[in-house]
Amino acid sequence: MSRQIIENGSAVLGIEFGSTRIKSVLIGPDHSVIASGSHEWENDFVNGIWTYSEDAILNGLRACYADLKRDVKEKYGVVPCRLSAIGISAMMHGYLPFDADMNLLVPFRTWRNTITGEAAEKLTEAFSFNMPQRWSLSHLYQAILNNEPHVPSIRFFTTLAGWVHFLLTGQKVLGVGDASGMMPIDSSTCDFDRNMVRIFDELIAGRGFPWKLEDILPRSIPAGEDAGTLTAAGALLLDAEGDLQPGCPLCPPEGDAGTGMAATNSVRAKTGNVSAGTSIFSMIVLEKPLSSVYPEIDVVTTPTGKQVGMVHCNSCTSDINAWVSLFREFADLMGFATDAGDVYTRLFRKAMEGAPDCGGIVSFNYFAGEPVTGLSEGRPMLIRTPDAKMSIANFMRAQIYASMETLKAGMEIMGREKVAIDQVYGHGGLFKTEGVAQNLLAAAIHAPVTVMETAGEGGAWGIALLAAYAVCRENGETLEDYLDRRVFAGMKQLTVRPDPVDEAGFDAYMNNFLACIPAQKAAVEGLKI
């Protein structure tokens, strides 16, 4: 059956550029994954900027598709020649400015950079809307404030997903969810807020640029809208061997937040999800606007334009990965061969034996700055009291707490705002070991957390679902109904409610964590990079 789906061109391709891995999946008409591919990559820190080079992006795209193609050939003895639809997703935000010939003017500045503080503060004041440092417009305005010489030459700027989509289709469009990470969106139109566009143009009116903001923004469109088709050049970019035929439609390119919402069926009001990988963020679809502007909470949108309260934290699993790597190196030194997956599973399970408050251990997993807690830079750091019990269980529990401690700080504001939450879904690598991160997240946010059997599929599957929706929906069928009825109906899921003991323990840990923030700030000042 899967071979026939591939041969008759009814498979849908989803590709997502994550922070450490580019992943591709093929799904069939039942939305299940029939093949996958991946490519590992890492950002570079160049001249004080977190970036991925053009070559890394383009070569990574080709390598990821080639890996998927190998998987298809090994499993089914065929190669994909035609596709029903394609979706492209990537990490949100950041800065990719282009000239009139679509030459990249400066290296890609990713979401991880916290170098736009002045711009973000001024835009927040001008808009009366929280403008985070990582948002694309904050990067543009900071470049203007810095008098960077490339700015007058800008004729287009977009996100990573928007650029890759352009390379495949020639269309300068962006899904509304990803667009909401560039600058604020008017949910009634699913377009950039016209009043804020006007305000921005007034801010830069005296600088003499040959463009206005509207001239250089992509066109924002909701899920299901026409976003172009795969060109011959785009097909060859994906498949260097030339087997893939052009002509199939692409859905609006989306950010990883939007694909996370699709992959967890959390696009309706009062639903939400927590995505936990290299970064961690919560997305709660708002029933009504927040009563105030909070620097800790971003207001973005679903792929259909509904307002979402987002708590975004730059660091999640990186420090856990570093410690696991250290433990495996020690095991190798002692002559014991280990399997990475098995080590993670054992250590995660051991964490549940630790003291609820981690026994006096506090961990900062800050590989980068965290605006939620007022840090422009980060230094991974472990702190413990002299009488702390330094056990593997307490240590690992502290590492898992650290992966969500900053998120918890932001979610407490949602609680004070009395944001209605019916369901929260967890997805991403942190939740692979059953009964660990899911349980501790429930304790962190004081709400039930559900993990579905597709929790490990992630954003590539989510963008594939959005691509399938674009070509398979019935007339007038909403994305919410499509996901409910066609994708998630009857899907196996596990829900856990917060354990009061874990809740009290995490709250006690948070008191220690918050008290140690001055030490983290001192480490940033004292340990320069």
Image (cartoon, rainbow, N blue to C red):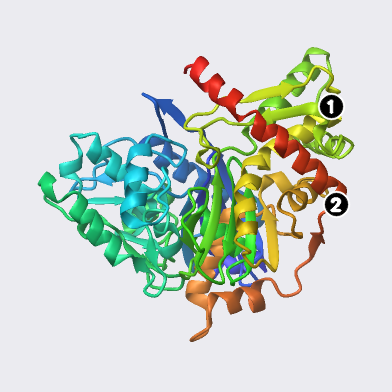
The residue lying toward the viewer, choosing from 443 and 314, is 443
Q: Is residue 365 visible?
A: yes
Q: Which residue is mark 2?
A: 500
The location of residue 137, given as percent across then percent down, is: 33, 49
The residue lying toward the viewer, choosing from 346 and 168, is 346
Left or right? Give the position of 342 relative to 518: right
Q: Residue furthest right?
A: 353
Res 170 → quadrant: bottom left
Q: Looking at the image, which residue is at 69% across and 60% down?
A: 425
Q: Which residue is mark 1?
A: 392
**Mark number for residue 133?**
none
The residue lying toward the viewer, choosing from 340 and 412, is 412
Res 172 → quadrant: bottom left
In the figure, 283 relative to 141: above or below?
below
For the residue marked with disc 2, what is the amino acid?
Pro
The location of residue 526, given as percent across then percent down, is: 51, 15
Q: Is residue 83 visible?
A: no
| Circle nearer the viewer, 2 or 1 | 2
Left or right? Give the position of 414 relative to 296: right
Disc 1 element: helix
Left or right? Give the position of 321 relative to 353: left
In the figure, 115 relative to 525: above or below?
below
Which comes sooner in the sequence, label 2 or label 1? 1
Q: Residues within 10 Å of mark 1 (few under 14, many from 20)?
A: some
Q: Looking at the image, which residue is at 40% across and 73% down?
A: 225
Marks 2 and 1, Cα distance to the nearest angstrom?
23 Å
For the residue marked with disc 1, what is the amino acid?
Ile
Q: Are marks 2 and 1 in contact (CB under 8 Å)?
A: no
Res 522 → quadrant: top right
Disc 2 element: helix
Q: Looking at the image, which residue is at 80% across and 27% down?
A: 360
